[in-house]
């Protein structure tokens, strides 16, 4: 599935924002990937939000989120080092 | 005909008699007695087992104790799934009390999320409610609420206060008068036998012609293997809160009355017992 990553606040911005990800990739897997890419420490927190309204569970599959909350052929995810939308 | 509100109460106050036993390989200073507890179906394991933890910690050495986790017949139990769902999915047709094994070592990182504090449970619970409202109302209702309303939902669950919880939750169960129901139904279908964690898709409660979609319609659409062919034997049970609702039940009604406090319909598809 196609995802688009958007940074929130003063979180570093990914140079590549668009990614094609397997359906079964979990949110936790995505978090680990973004942290590596942005060279963040494993201990630093990273929050991911769907529709700028909720933070999905780490074990949730990206494919399911895409089916329920994707639009225009992609799933937009906001990421932030601090809690943005609770 | 039972009042619909009675259904809400029956769902809220459902309990599962459970026997907690310490895993035999845990190192104890004395014999560990099993601990019996009535678990609320609608709550989460780590929210309601403080007494269990205290009970077993009493017989263990301090250094042996780390994060508690639970297992049933070798399967680690995900604390972030509601208790009723875990029971229906794994132990529904077995003898009561439900026998759960308690562990303090070798936390299964691959299978379970950590639960370092009650705040983690609250965050998870609120995230589920928000996701459900994103499906039902494009998040309009939950976003219009104040922070104290959100807090009241959590406190109602945590303190087992039906009225306190529903004073706010009823707003999440409303829909505009010009519609016949929610935009989409928040549901998750679980099968113990499959690899994928659950099925969750967009599903409208009302057809374009105005007819109400039923539980049967939902299953036909997203999980057709759960419904057997007309002439065949029904090999599976479709279970919510320990009962098998009739497949003709409108899904909108189920969503309003038999959702868990997180506003999701957690549905288990389990093998029908053959006896």
Image: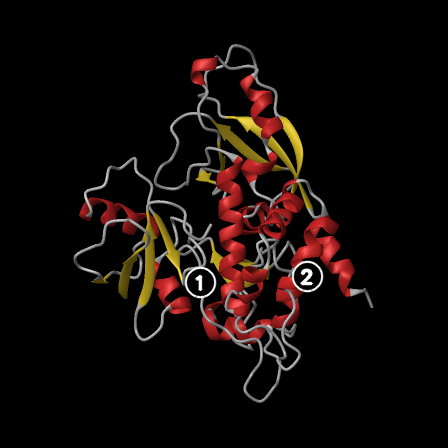
Q: Quadrant of residue B55?
A: top right
Q: Is residue B46 above or below residue B241?
A: above
Q: Residue furthest right?
A: B1
User: Which-is-in-front pick, marks 1 and 2?
Assistant: 2
Labels 1 and 2 within one chain: yes
Q: Is residue B64 left or right of residue A5?
A: right
Residue located at (54% from left, 19% from top): B57
Query: Residue B237's x, y, as percent?
Result: 57, 61
Q: Nearer the viewer, residue B272 or B128?
A: B128
Say which chain tag 1 marks: B
Q: Is residue B61 above or below residue B101?
A: above
Residue tagged by mark 2?
B170
Helix, strand or loop for disc 1: loop
Query: Residue B79's x, y, as percent?
Result: 50, 41
Q: Is residue B238 left or right of residue B4?
A: left
Q: Residue furthest top?
A: B29
Query: Residue A77's x, y, as percent?
Result: 33, 60
- All told, the count of numbered labels is 2
Q: Quadrant of the N terminus of chain B?
A: bottom right
Q: Nearer the viewer, residue B237 or A38?
A: A38
Q: Quadrant of the C terminus of chain B?
A: bottom right
Dot 2 surroundings within 10 Å: few (below 14), some, or many (20 or more)? Answer: few
Q: Residue furthest left?
A: A15
The colour scheme used to paint the residues is: secondary structure
Helix, strand or loop for disc 2: helix
Dot 1 surroundings within 10 Å: few (below 14), some, or many (20 or more)? Answer: some
- Label of residue B199 in the image: 1
Q: Nearer the viewer, residue B156 or B202?
A: B156
Residue located at (48% from left, 12% from top): B61
Residue located at (53% from left, 51% from top): B126
């Amino acid at each position: 599935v196609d995802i688009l990553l958007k940074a929130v606040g003063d979180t570093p911005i990914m140079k590549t924002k668009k990614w094609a990800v397997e359906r079964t990739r979990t949110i936790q897997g995505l978090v680990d990937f973004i942290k590596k890419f942005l060279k963040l420490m494993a201990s630093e927190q990273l929050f991911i939000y769907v529709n700028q309204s909720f933070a999905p569970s780490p074990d949730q599959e990206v494919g399911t989120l895409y089916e329920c909350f994707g639009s225009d052929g992609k799933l937009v995810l906001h990421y932030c080092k601090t809690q943005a939308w609770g | 005909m039972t009042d619909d509100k009675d259904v809400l109460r029956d769902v809220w106050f459902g309990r599962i008699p459970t026997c907690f036993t310490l895993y035999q390989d845990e190192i104890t200073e004395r014999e560990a007695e099993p601990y019996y507890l009535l678990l609320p179906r609608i709550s989460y394991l780590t929210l309601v087992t403080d007494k269990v933890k205290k009970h077993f910690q009493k017989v263990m050495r301090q250094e042996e104790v780390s994060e508690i986790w639970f297992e049933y017949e070798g399967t680690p139990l995900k604390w972030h799934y509601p208790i009723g769902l875990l029971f229906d999915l794994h132990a529904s047709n077995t003898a009561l009390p439900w026998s759960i094994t308690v562990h303090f070592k070798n936390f299964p990182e691959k299978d379970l999320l950590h639960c370092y504090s009650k705040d983690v449970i609250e965050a998870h619970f609120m995230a589920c409610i928000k996701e459900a409202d994103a499906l039902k109302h494009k998040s309009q209702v939950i976003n219009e609420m104040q922070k104290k309303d959100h807090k009241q939902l959590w406190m109602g669950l945590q303190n087992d206060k039906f009225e306190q919880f529903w004073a706010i939750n009823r707003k999440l169960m409303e829909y505009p008068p010009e519609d016949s129901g929610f935009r989409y139904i928040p549901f998750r279908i679980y099968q113990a036998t499959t690899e994928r964690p659950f099925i969750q898709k967009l599903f409208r409660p009302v057809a374009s012609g105005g007819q109400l979609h039923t539980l049967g319609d939902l299953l036909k659409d997203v999980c057709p293997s759960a419904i057997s062919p007309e002439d065949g034997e029904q090999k599976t049970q479709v279970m919510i809160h320990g009962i098998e609702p009739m497949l003709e039940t409108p899904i909108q009604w189920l969503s309003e009355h038999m959702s868990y406090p997180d506003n999701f319909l957690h549905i288990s598809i389990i093998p029908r017992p053959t006896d």
